[in-house]
Amino acid sequence: MDLKDLYRDVILDHNRQPRNFGVLTHPDAHADGHNPLCGDRLTVWLRLDGDRVADIRFEGKGCAISTASASLMTEAVKGKDRVAIQQLYERIHTLLTQPHVAASDASLGKLAALAGVSEFPARVKCATLCWHTLNAALEHSADAVSTE
Ligand code: ZN
């Protein structure tokens, strides 16, 4: 099994059984996101402990990449503060747009499975939708965000 198969398996697994999927009751913040290019829709709910994401859940309908990316993101950001989340997003963005630069970033863990998306530039917005939506929720914005 080569790395590409492994990455595809991670994406398929997180699409089939998304982690932290469902409504979070009594959230401190939430936001809706929409990627009109693909039709992906997501809602992200947060429970905050000061500057830290104590709990996160998401729900939505979208393609396998948007669902898997959101599932992987919720696992990765739980327990992290805003600064750490912003730094992680910047590394994910590099992975999606300049994979040759990000290739050596072993600290991404399972999120590295998104590397394959870089071969399909039109799908990058599917993978980043959840991060834009998380950002909007962190800004305590109840407004819908769009990747457009
Ligand atoms: Zn999509």
Image (cartoon, grey):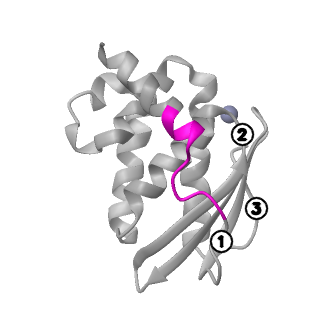
Report the mark closest to the observer, 3 or 2. Answer: 2
Distance in Å between CA atoms under marks 3 and 2: 16 Å
Distance in Å between CA atoms under marks 1 and 3: 10 Å
Q: Which residue is identified by label 2?
A: 62
Amino acid type, label 1? His
- Magenta-drawn stretch contains 20: yes
The quadrant of the image that shows the N terminus is top left
Task: Return the x and y of residue 28 as percentages of the image width and height.
Answer: 59, 82
Choose the circle earlier in sequence order: 3 or 2: 2
Helix, strand or loop under label 1? strand
**Residues at badges 3 and 2 in contact (C-beta under 8 Å)?**
no
Report the mark closest to the observer, 1 or 2. Answer: 2
Q: Which mark is on residue 30?
A: 1
Residue closer to the observer: 37 or 74: 74
Task: Return the x and y of residue 51 as percentages of the image width and height.
Answer: 40, 80
Query: Which stretch did the figure color magenta?
Result: 13-22
Choose the circle earlier in sequence order: 1 or 3: 1
Residue closer to the observer: 16 or 41: 16
134 relative position to 104: left or right? right
Distance in Å between CA atoms under marks 1 and 2: 18 Å
Q: Which mark is on residue 144?
A: 3
